[in-house]
Image (cartoon, rainbow, N blue to C red):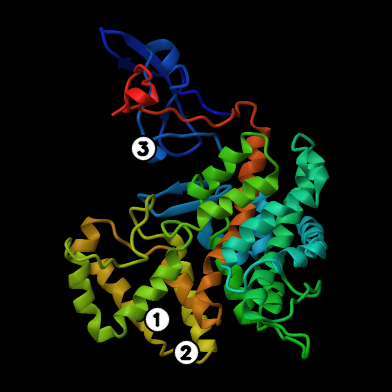
């Protein structure tokens, strides 16, 4: 239940000395918000907020971020604790249902997800219709949207049972669809999921297994990938999550909403950042060249940018980056890449960022993308799959946010307003009189 601020109000003067009182609302933690839902009716004016950086579009109980302190909570639990003590499906349960599962609840949930990992065989025919060099994200967008054509009963979003089945299907089938997209681009046979594997292990099996020999999942790699999934599971009202909510507000199917979220995630300013980090580290090349690139990064006239630093929300160290840093050390050591030049460059860049006044003043600290790309590349996952893996992990957050929106009695179809700056009404000019 939202705290309405104990009767507190904010006063707004909007022309002709018209004073309007707006209610102040408080959440369980975080800044208060001013309720402007009746602003237009009372004053005839809108607010102007490009990017919605100062606007709360919904109430949510799922994820909380304190960017100033570098805190990320899922249902009240610190992301560092969840990454250390839980596996991905346990975190999925928490995000979906609000509490950490008991042993029996987790076993039932894992079973439900595991036995929904197969996709309809005709999905394979759809994938074969793409060009061989199609980007995996393009395939993912199309295939997830196409699920609406296979599961008609899930289109009734007002039925809680149907929403629950759609939730299981999306979480379970996303790794299968993502791996199919990769196998197709690589010209290799599709690999079916195997129920004996863990969630992350199954994805590795479908990515790297071949029919001619058994694939043995390395538990350290599976754990590292599982941790990447956890750290990307949800992140409050970012661009892709807001897209899912906006599309879902129309009553569209969950598959259409999640497909739209994947499309939003594909943008290089959102989900493609870890790929950009790997490319940047390759451009730097070696530790001894770092001073040159630091100088370039500080030069406002130089187009070079240090990728993986700074975040729209975090004005402190991204808590997910610290978790991934230790994972990067463990994975690269296991793979015999302890002297990996990109990891050495990343460590030195991080050290400089945490000590240099330029980075400190601008709050440019390493974010989650800074180390995730290094880990994925070390695991021989191609950069074209980086964002697809992000989408795979974020699916649980999207579907949880979608479910929350559907159940919210205050939910309305999304309809932002605008500040119109085009021509005012003018008379129509016939063709023969123009010019």
Work out which residue is located at the far front of the displayed protein and give it: 432
Pinpoint residue 415: horizontal percent, then vertical percent.
51, 29
Q: Quadrant of the C terminus?
A: top left
Residue 181 vertical position relative to residue 208 in the rendered view, above or below: above
Residue at 80% across, 52% down: 150
- Marks 1/2 in contact by CB < 8 Å: the verdict is yes
Residue 161 quadrant: top right
Which residue carries the number 2 mark? 337
Query: Which mark's residue is nearer the viewer, 3 or 2?
Result: 3
Q: On the picture, is 222 further left or further right than 10? A: right
- Identify the secondary structure beneath mark 2: loop
The answer to which of marks 3 and 1 sits earlier in the sequence is 3
Q: Please, is residue 353 above or below residue 264 in the view?
A: below
Q: Which residue is mark 3?
A: 50
Q: Spatial distance from mark 3 to mark 1, Cα to Cα?
A: 37 Å
Q: Find disc 1 in the rendering and name its residue.
A: 343
298 relative to 242 in the view: left or right: left
Q: Secondary structure at mark 1?
A: helix
Of pointers 3 and 2, the one earlier in the residue sequence: 3
Along the viewing direction, whichever of 197 and 137 lies nearer the viewer = 137
**What is the distance, in whole Å, between disc 1 and disc 2 at their CAs?**
9 Å
């Amino acid at each position: 239940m939202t705290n309405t601020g104990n009767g507190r109000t904010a006063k707004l003067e909007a022309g002709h000395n018209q004073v309007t009182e707006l209610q102040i609302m408080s959440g369980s933690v975080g800044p208060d918000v001013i309720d402007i839902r009746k602003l237009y009716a009372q004053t005839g004016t809108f607010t102007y907020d490009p990017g919605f950086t100062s606007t709360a579009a919904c109430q949510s109980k799922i994820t909380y971020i304190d960017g100033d302190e570098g805190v990320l909570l899922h249902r009240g639990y610190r992301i560092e604790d969840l990454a250390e003590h839980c596996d991905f499906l346990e975190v999925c349960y928490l995000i979906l249902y609000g509490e950490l599962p008991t042993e029996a609840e987790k076993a039932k949930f894992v079973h439900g997800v595991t036995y929904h990992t197969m996709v309809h065989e005709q999905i394979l025919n759809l994938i074969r219709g793409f060009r061989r060099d199609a980007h995996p994200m393009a395939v993912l967008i199309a295939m997830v949207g196409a699920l609406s054509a296979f599961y008609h009963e899930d289109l009734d979003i007002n039925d809680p049972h149907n929403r629950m089945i759609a939730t299981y299907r999306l979480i379970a089938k996303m790794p299968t669809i993502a791996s199919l997209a990769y196998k197709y681009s690589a010209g290799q046979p599709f690999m079916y999921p195997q129920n004996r594997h863990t969630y992350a292990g199954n994805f590795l099996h479908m990515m790297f297994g071949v029919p001619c020999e058994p694939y043995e999942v390395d538990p350290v790699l599976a754990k590292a990938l599982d941790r990447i999934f956890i750290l990307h599971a949800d992140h409050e009202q970012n661009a892709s999550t807001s897209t899912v909510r906006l599309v879902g507000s129309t009553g569209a199917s969950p598959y259409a909403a999640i497909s739209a979220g994947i499309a939003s995630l594909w943008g290089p300013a959102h989900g493609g950042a870890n790929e950009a980090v790997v490319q940047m580290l390759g451009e730097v090349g070696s530790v001894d060249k770092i001073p040159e690139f630091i100088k370039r990064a500080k030069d406002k006239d130089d187009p070079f940018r240090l990728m993986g630093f700074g975040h729209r929300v975090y004005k402190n160290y991204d808590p997910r980056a610290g978790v991934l840093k230790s994972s990067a050390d463990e994975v690269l050591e296991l793979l015999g890449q302890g002297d990996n030049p990109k990891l050495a460059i990343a460590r030195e860049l991080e050290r400089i960022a945490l000590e240099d006044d330029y980075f400190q003043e601008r709050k440019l600290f390493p974010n989650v993308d800074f180390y995730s790309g290094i880990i994925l590349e070390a695991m021989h996952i191609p950069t074209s799959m980086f964002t697809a893996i992000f989408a795979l992990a974020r699916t649980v957050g999207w579907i949880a946010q979608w479910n929350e929106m559907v159940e919210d009695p205050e939910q309305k179809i999304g309809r932002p307003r605008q500040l119109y700056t085009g021509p005012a009404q003018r008379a129509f000019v016939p063709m023969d009189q123009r010019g």
